[in-house]
Amino acid sequence: MEKYGKPSLKVNKGDIIKIQDIEVKQINLKPQDIPLDIIYEDKDIIVVNKPKGLVVHPANGNPDGTLVNAIMNICKTSLSGIGGELRPGIVHRLDKDTSGLIMVAKNDVAHIDLSEQIKNHEVKKIYLALVRGIVKENQATINMPIARSIKDRKKMAVSKDGKNAITHFKVIERFNEYTLLELQIETGRTHQIRVHMSYIGYPVVGDMVYSNGKNPFGVKGQMLHSYMLSFRHPMTKEILKLQAPLPKYFEDVLNKLKNTPAI
């Protein structure tokens, strides 16, 4: 019987092992005229308010139409090459359906400095999220390790064998059946906020992966917005504190909820 094996699969005497090459599609990066909301830009860095639905960098499923393609159109000079050919200038990521601030390095020196700041937890990242359920605690810290799910390799999950993951949150406003939270992450694990909030029973509204995705607002994709970034400029050493307003659809949902306050 033929079957696909995981890296951890133990082989037995007599087993026949076949190695199949996976064809990697070639992706040619090219500048594309995609409108972007630029929050800050100078000769070393650019900070963009990424809209929901925009993928950060090209991959096999998204060969173009990404943030990188748009940035290349804006930055006529070369971007940092540390992230590799498909991720020029990309210092950190946001999920496709997470909106908000993301910083990009225009040169290698800026990239290295910003990466070190992230590694040393010197970059302050604050998000706003609308979650399902009324959160009782006014503020709390979630300290639960995260690893790739053993049930679904496309998902992440809380696991004792995972990497350290810390999320702080505080309640901004409670509504009927929903809560608006401000969240600060100390670590940058994949899907961290979405995994943590779902695990404690308050999934992000619209999240199609870590909740049932249903909501009465017709929102597609998680209501999660990176609204504040604070970091030290890699060259001038000035502390920059940048903010991005909530997307209109997010504001519209909150306005609807304000008319139905929590009981």
Image (cartoon, rainbow, N blue to C red):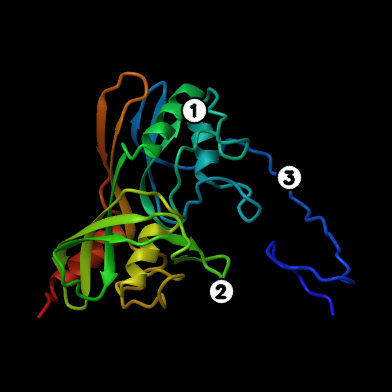
Task: Kindly state the secondary structure of the residue where label 1 is placed.
Answer: loop
Dot 1: few (<14), some (14–19), or many (≥20) neighbours within 10 Å?
some
x and y, in percent, of residue 245 in the image: 25, 48
Residue under pointer 3: 26
x and y, in percent, of residue 159 in the image: 45, 66
Task: Kindly state the secondary structure of the residue where label 3 is placed.
Answer: loop
Task: Kindly state the secondary structure of the residue where label 2 is placed.
Answer: loop
Quadrant (top left/top right/bottom left/bottom right) for the N terminus? bottom right
Residue under pointer 1: 75
Say which amino acid is labelled 3. Answer: Gln
Farthest residue to the left: give it.
Answer: 263
Q: For marks 2 and 3, give the one nearer the viewer.
A: 2
Say which amino acid is labelled 2. Answer: Lys
Dot 3: few (<14), some (14–19), or many (≥20) neighbours within 10 Å?
few
Circles 2 and 3, Cβ within 8 Å, touching? The answer is: no
x and y, in percent, of residue 199 in the image: 36, 71
Quadrant (top left/top right/bottom left/bottom right) for the C terminus? bottom left
Q: CA distance from mark 2 to mark 3?
A: 30 Å
Q: Is residue 186 left or right of residue 64?
A: left
Q: Residue at position x 39%, y 58% from top? A: 192
Residue 33 at least partly seen:
no
Foreground residue among 22 and 216? 22
Labelled disc at residue 151? 2
Q: Is residue 31 above or below residue 128?
A: above
